[in-house]
Structures are given as structure tokens and as C-alpha cells.
Amino acid sequence: SNVMLFKKSLRGLSPVRHVMSDSLGNFTFNYLYTGTYYAKAVPVAFYAPAWYDADSCGVLHWVNADSFVISGNTSGINICVLPIVATGFARISGTVNATGNITTPVQGVTVFAISTTTNSVLGYDITEQNGNYFITDIAPGTYRIIVDKEGYIASEAFHIVSPTNNYTVSNANFTLTNSTLGVGDNDSGIPSEYYVKQNYPNPFNPTTEISFGLPTASKVEIVVYNLLGQQVATLFSGELTAGKHSISWNGKDNSGKTPGSGIYFYKINAITHDNIGKFKSVKKMILMK
């Protein structure tokens, strides 16, 4: 894999080093200044890029990544990536631009095609100098296309590739806006935007942890659903302050009973007190007995 190192500063997140891992996946950066860093792996093939996170695998957005402090020799910065299986012949392409006085192409944006059926990455590309990307060899179906670039607010959209468009979507374009805080957390530890991490461990038995961040005080509801869309358990409903939070699920429903093994979904709704800022996120988790 290509491993990129980013340093956090008052100006934001800046790339400072790049190395290739060896055949066992090991990598080393030498002669670094003391500071706070982020790391991202971009595999050569067969795996999706991901950011370093201490307790999750396949983190796609920089704002959901974990930072780490380097002050002397530092180890244990292990980046987990998830496999990609090319399953088709369909294609999605487009251009990523940045807003400003003049709309300009953005190079180095990672664009993912995520299956709405399996919630897994089935293809990706990194934008060229002209902002163009081309995701090929994916199966027909509905995809959630999300883009990730350090220093920019995440963006996503849904697209369908089917016989009606000759299995090709060529206008999946995005316009990115700079993140006002530059990095995932400001100096007070407050996230720059809402985020929800993948539960850990996953699969789990009997307890799992769900971590999330709020950029401002919000009314929050966290609910678990089964595959039929039926409510299983309400994990939280109330107000929370801005910052990082986590809540656990002990695998029991609202009546205190333990549901069967299988796939469940946790949905987080957050809304600011003035009802202007709203956030929703749904993620899949697996209960195994």
C-alpha cells in the first residue's frame, strides 16, 4: 500500500510524507517532528483506501479518522483496509470541483462507489489534475457515491446504473466546500461536523460500542432496527453537549430480551436546538451468538 502521513496544524491538515509498505504491510516514517498526525493507506489493488482509526476498519472520511501524537518512537499505527471485489461492467464517472471565486478542479479526491445493498465499497478512483474520476467494473445497481479529501466537507449522492442509461453514469459531479476548521477536531476537541463511527467490535457478542461526534449541542436519538425495519431498542433519546460521545448496546431489546443473531442497523438522528442543523446516519452491525 501507499501510506500517506498528514500533519495537523493551525492551517489544517497537510500531507508531509509518503512511503510504500513492504510485502507484510509494514511501513516506517523516519525523522518526524513532534506533533499531531493522521495517516491514510491507499492500496495498490484489490482493497479500498482507508484512514487510520484505532478501533474501526475501512474508515473512508478523514473527519472520522483518529489522530495520533508523535514525540519520539511511535508504533502501533495500524491501518485496516477492506477488500474490493470487481463484479461487473458498469461505470460511473464525473468531476470534482471546489467552490471559490472560480470553480476549480480538485486533484487527489478519493471517490467511492458503495453498494446500497451490502454497504460495502465495490469500486473507487482518485481524481486526476482536471478533477475527473472513473469507477469501472461495478455491477448494475444503486450506488452511494461519496467523496473524501482532507480539508473539505464530505459530500455524497446516489446514482443508478442500469439498462436505461446503458450501464453508464457520466455526470456524477461534486462541488466541495472547505471545512471551516480545517481538521476533524479543533483545539478544544470539538468535531468540525457531525460524524458516526462504525460500531466496535463488529460482529459482536454481547456488547458493542457506538462512537459519534457533535459539532454543537444537539437533541439526539439513537435507535436499533432489525432487517424488517422494526424498532428493537432505543439506546438514547435526549440532549447532548458538543464533543465526542459513545454509547453501548448490550444486545437486548426494549423489553430486556435478547434478539436472535443477525444483521441490525443503528440510526442516529441529531438536530440543533434552533432546528437549523440536522444530521442522520444509518450503519449496519452484526450480532453473533
Image (cartoon, helix red, strand yellow):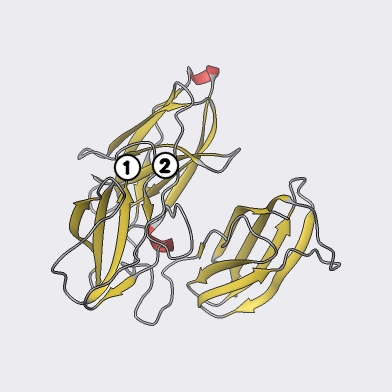
Q: Mark 1 falls on what kind of element?
A: strand
Of the pair 33 and 63, the residue shown nearer to us: 33
Position of 262 with respect to 73 (left or right) is right
Q: Residue furthest left?
A: 31
Q: Which mark is residue 112?
A: 2
Q: Is residue 73 left or right of residue 139?
A: left
Location of residue 157 with respect to 272 vertically, above or below = above
x and y percent of residue 111 in the render? 37, 42
Asked if one can make out residue 13 in the rendered structure from this viewpoint, the answer is no
Mark 2 Cα within 10 Å, few/some/many (few <14, many 20+)?
many
Callout in the foreground (2, 1): 2
Q: Which residue is mark 1?
A: 96
**Spatial CA span between label 2 and label 1:** 13 Å
How far from the left and from the top, in percent, is residue 225? 73, 55
- Residue lying at 39% horizontally and 67% vertically, measured from the top left: 66
The structure residue drawn at horizontal position 76% and vertical position 63%, both measured from the top left corner, is 233
Name the foreground residue: 165 vs 140: 140
Location of residue 126 by image quarter = top left
Three-letter code for the amino acid on which mark 2 is drawn: Phe
Q: Amino acid at mark 1?
A: Val
Residue 95: x and y, percent? 32, 37
**Crowd rating for badge 1 (residues with CA inside 10 Å; few <14, some 14–19, many 20+):** many
The image quadrant that residue 26 belongs to is bottom left
